[in-house]
Amino acid sequence: MIQDFFKKLVKAQKDLNREKIEEIVNELHKLNVYRFNWVRDVFEQTHVKERASKTALVWRDMDSKDESRLTYYEMDVLANKVLNTFRKHGLNKGSVIYLMTKVHPMHWAVFLAVIKGGLVLVPSATNLTVSELKYRFSDLKPDAVVADSLRAPVLEQALGSLPVKKFLIDDKKWGWNAFEEESTNAEPTDTYKDDVVLNYFTSGTTGMPKRVLHTATSYPLGSITTASFMGINEEDVHLNLSATGWAKFAWSSFFSPLLVGATVAAINYEGKLDPKRYLTEVEDLRVSSFCAPPTAWRQFIGLELGAYKLDRLRSIVSAGEPLNPEVIKLWKEKFGVIIRDFYGQTETTAIIGNFPFLKIKPGSMGIPHPLYDVVLLDENGVAITKPHETGYIAIKLNPRPIGLFLGYSDQSKNQEVFKGGYYYTGDKAYMDEDGYFFFVGRGDDVIKTSDYRVGPFEVESALLEHPAVVEAAVVGVPDPIRWQLVKAFVVIRKEYAPSRELAEEIREKARVVLSPYKVPRIIEFVDELPKTISGKIRRIELRKLEEERRKRGEKPKNEFSF
């Protein structure tokens, strides 16, 4: 039975080793998960049933100072009321719900309700603009939206006249009028292994954001990889520093801790991270397992760490891009706990990582999880076996890993990544003699900045809306804090002259349609852009140009930084 498997998983998480992980994976492959509803079969039957009075979620808001604690039973009751409310408004299996809220207990309740009811959830970043939302709605029309008061006006504008049900998590204006009167019980919907329950939009390379389809099994079951890399167990208070709307939130704030019966800690803050206040909350909540992006770790080590005790912290991980060895060293010296790196994608769960039992190699993202058969391929799709030779990170499709997404909504994108019996991640790495993987970079043009992925095409399209811009090419340039900064090479019309004022005008124009992290921080005016014989922009040449300039310490005359 599926419940027996998860009981074994909970027990194994307390004492993970390579043999036990492989044993769990082998059992998972043998499970009959043709019909599977994660909330019914795991959350309720394994955890609510046996841990009803245990705290499932402790939530704090850094600004309002509000706090909420929910047991597993109370969380289930809240989710049932949400599901019953949805059903009362005609939302049933297959109905599409966009979720765009701050970190809030209702966010977890909506996740649970949607999965239990077999609906389709589209978690959406809280900083999306009207234009970005309209693009998403054109790809997948919503039947309902769930928002908070701060995000509601943007959603209202993006929806326009679309006939959509609307719900506010912090106000009864939208949809929740009879919420408290709803039954505390709700019947689960039968879902099957390939039923789509989650959709995420991720940046593409030469086109607009791609819609990623996840199933009733891919994230719900595949998240055992993330849980085992983090080493999280039922005794932990686990905190993940991640904004809602991103796949990492689903990985680390929802599925992984709730898979093993842990307590989820959640901290809401708006705007720029205040590392001092945040770390104070980590200490006060007595967090034992903590996941944060490299940008946050770099900010934390800039604090006076002697002011913090953090005596409960036993397991800490980083994900997003490689973490500086110096950051790992300083944290270990102060607290005696090493920050472990791991790697994955929106299209997968965690693929490669540093298990708690693994000896850490500085700069390495670890070894593949047994759930995924990971290889490095050369330009011809041939497996690389020689150490230190760079190749494309790919996953064997036979057998198809449970944690792998079903595919993109755009079939042409599927043809690009599923080929020759492999799924190509689009990232490059090399492997050492001991099988440790080292991240090299994207195999395409996607920019990684402050734990966000940015597709250049989307930014270039926004820049072209300014009347002065004839052409634009966007690349990522190295940055010690954010890993990469978004830089735009811009060709302008003859009647305009390069200047800081014009660069600022172009940026302001882009702000109207782009999320803040996508707006270029550097703009360089150029006479022309390098192109292929067919007219495609060669961004690789621009990246090489930047690397050479930085080695020589050169700054172009018409470059402006912000």
Image (cartoon, rainbow, N blue to C red):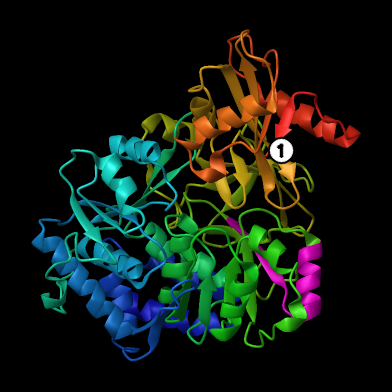
* Residue 161 locus on image (x, y percent): 18, 38
Task: Report which quarter residue 2 is drawn in.
Answer: bottom left
* Residue 442 locus on image (x, y percent): 64, 40
The magenta segment is: 326-343
> What's the residue type where badge 1 is placed?
Val
Q: Is residue 486 left or right of residue 454?
A: right
Name the residue rendered at 25%, 41% in the picture.
159
Q: Nearer the viewer, residue 365 or 61?
A: 61
- Categorize mark 1 by other alpha carbons within 10 Å: few (<14), some (14-19), many (20+): many
Name the residue rendered at 53%, 44% in the picture.
516
Quadrant showing the C terminus: top right
- Residue that label 1 marks: 477
Name the residue rendered at 68%, 16% in the picture.
530
Q: Secondary structure at mark 1?
A: strand
Task: Report which quarter residue 172 is drawn in.
Answer: bottom left
Q: Nearer the viewer, residue 377 or 98?
A: 98
Residue 373 in view of the camera:
yes
Q: Nearer the viewer, residue 228 or 383?
A: 228
Q: Is residue 122 left or right of residue 420?
A: left
Asked if residue 342 lies in the magenta stretch, the reply is: yes
Q: Looking at the image, is 274 positioned above or below residue 137? A: below
* Residue 543 locus on image (x, y percent): 72, 30
